Image: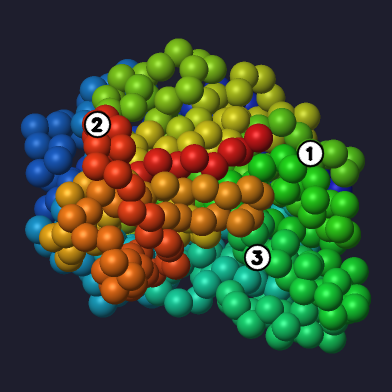
Amino acid sequence: MSAYFDAYLDALETRHPQSREQALMTRLPQLIAQAQTAAGWAAILQGVQASDIKSRTALAQLPVTRKSDLKQIQRSALPFGALTTTGLRQMNRIFMSPGPIFDPEGRSPDWWRFARPLHAVGLRAGHLIQNCFSYHFTPAAFMVEGAAARIGCTVIPAGTGQTEMQVQAIVELRPDAYVGTPSFLKIIIEKAAEMGADISSLQYAVVGAEALPPSLRLWLQEHGIPNVVQMYATADIGNIAYETVSDGALNPGMILDEDLILEIVRPGTGDLVAEGEVGEVVVTSFNPDYPLVRFGTGDMSAILPGISPCGRTNTRIKGWMGRADQTTKVKGMFVHPSQVAEVIKRHPEIRKARLVVTGELANDAMTLHCESTMRDAALKAAIVDSLREVTKLRGDVLFVDDLQLPNDGKVIDDARSYQ
């Protein structure tokens, strides 16, 4: 293998930005035409002439379809809202995220385009990966599986939980890399220290599905993982952007994937913001099975000017900078305002409620603050049970005085610090 292809997954990563832009714009009318073969997209893009959509200016005139709307869209035509161009039973897998929101996986190799972030951190054929993303209903673990197969890595399908077994697997199998949430890696390291176990084989960590504060990255590095990078992906799009390293040093920003068109828009609109201004991440994805046209992720970021020192020439973003709506992630799982509403609906004693998410580093905690006509222990226990059943996460309940919750329409308050 040449030094070039050892550094980069393929030649697409280093092509001239104008060549990339021209290639994307040439493909764009074909993508619109492909999307319009699906009834859902035909309705959303009604009256649009696919051959006219061959520039960013033309693309920006199309409506934004937001992730926050997917649940309702899918209810109208289960399971995918008639937004896929491949039949349900021709897919490889079907996933169900909280909401529920259904996500497909097609049959092409590395369907989620996840090999780029793994390759960028330094993983190569022959490396062994401990895959600690969940294999239960959600797609993150399978994103890793597809990428590992493309690169030639071997995978330990460890999933989440069973911390002592995770440590035992690292001690006895000596994996080179951990892939999963940063919070779970911290838990594994702490458990290994408690057990007096040697997990020094882990030299790489590719983390995602939740925020990675600088303090947590530093903590992981100080506790034996020198190469810690994060990637940004979603269950609808797959890999969106990823961090890179050069000569062991982390490069600024995240590199956009090669099969996407990125726009940053003013939250709640489809209007583009100026370069460098923070706004909502909107993605157009050239996916053969699940095309997405101006898909609003609900995530906030900004474009970082210039070319990365790693030599990859694609657009850089500053990384994940919060949510444009009130949907938030707790321990790698989305929690939606509609789920809070469902909990309130189950308990008519609750007059008003707000879910407050707090914590430092990886210790996320959520507490439902309730103004209620009753405040007894039995009701609190029942609400706690409902919260767990609806969100699939543990949470606490705190009764507060009437009129204590602000009248600002906020249902979820993410009070965590990402510094």
Colour scheme in use: rainbow
Q: Position of residue 302 (x, y in %)?
A: 52, 25
**Three-letter code, disc 3:** Phe
1 or 3: tag closer to the N-terminus: 3
Tell me the quadrant of the picture where the C terminus can be found: top right
Tell me which amino acid carries mark 2: Asn
Which residue was labeled with disc 1?
250
Badge nearest the viewer, 2 or 3 = 2
In the image, what residue occupies the spot 88% across and 59% down? 224
Q: Residue at x 26, y 30 (%)?
A: 408
Tag of residue 407: 2
In front: label 1 or label 3: 3
For residue 265, what is the image quadrant?
Answer: top left
Question: Is residue 278 rendered to the left or right of residue 184?
Answer: left
Measure the C-alpha gap from mark 1 to mark 3. Answer: 22 Å
Q: Which mark is residue 184?
A: 3
* Pick the front one: 130 or 19: 130
* Residue at horizontal 74 percent and vertical 58 percent from the top: 205
In the image, residue 252 sits, relative to residue 157, either above or below, namely above
